[in-house]
Image (cartoon, rainbow, N blue to C red):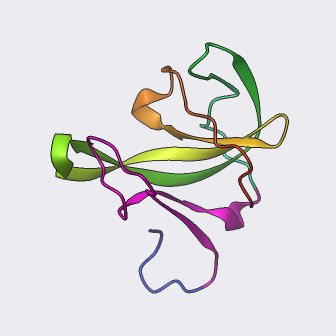
Amino acid sequence: FGNEGTTNGTILVATKVTGDAHVPAGEITWFVDVTSGGVHNNAPSTIRDQSDTEHRVVRSWYGMGTLSFPSFTRPSWDDGWLLELEGNNFAFCWSQFRWEKHTILHEFPL
């Protein structure tokens, strides 16, 4: 991630705890570069959660998330953002799914 040989910066890595039909437990689900200060111009300004509630994005960090066919077949990376939402909640938004509903991460320490 980033320039080869670069050693400065901080990468936050999220690992699946329970897993799902596509990415099993123990695999990296997403990672972000948190040294950017939380500003990324291409990130969405709002998202909707699974209940169709709109959330305003306060800050965002660029990263990549794991995508896969069922049973972790042909896993790949897709651009995305860790989003800090109003109310100190977070979500990860894959770029190709930015218009779909998102899962909100509660009590997420950053």
Q: How far across and how far down the image is residue 90, in percent?
A: 69, 43
- Choose between 10 and 41: the one closer to the eye: 10
Residue drawn at x 70%, y 67% as measured from the top left: 35
Residue 85: x %, y % from top left: 76, 36
The image quadrant where one finds the C terminus is bottom right
Q: Is 29 part of what is drawn in magenta?
A: yes
Asked if 30 appears above or below 93 in the picture, the reply is below
On screen, residue 63 above or below 22? below
Q: The magenta stretch spans which residues? A: 8-37
Q: Position of residue 9 (x, y in %)?
A: 64, 77
**Horizontal arrangement in the rendering, residue 81 relative to residue 97 (left or right):** right
Outermost residue toward the left in this view:
73
Vertical side of 9 occupied by 69: above or below:
above
> Which residue is situated farthest in the front direction here?
18
25 within the magenta span: yes
Rendering coords of residue 100 (x, y %): 48, 21
Name the quadrant containing residue 92.
Answer: top right
In this rendering, position of residue 34 left or right of residue 59: left
Figure quadrant of the N terminus: bottom left
**Please, which residue is most extreme toward the right here?**
87
**Which residue is nearer to you in this view: 56 or 44?**
56
Residue beneath the point at 74% across and 50% down: 107
Residue at (48% x, 69% y) in the render: 2
> Residue shown at 42%/52% (left/top)?
18
Count of numbered circles in the view: 0
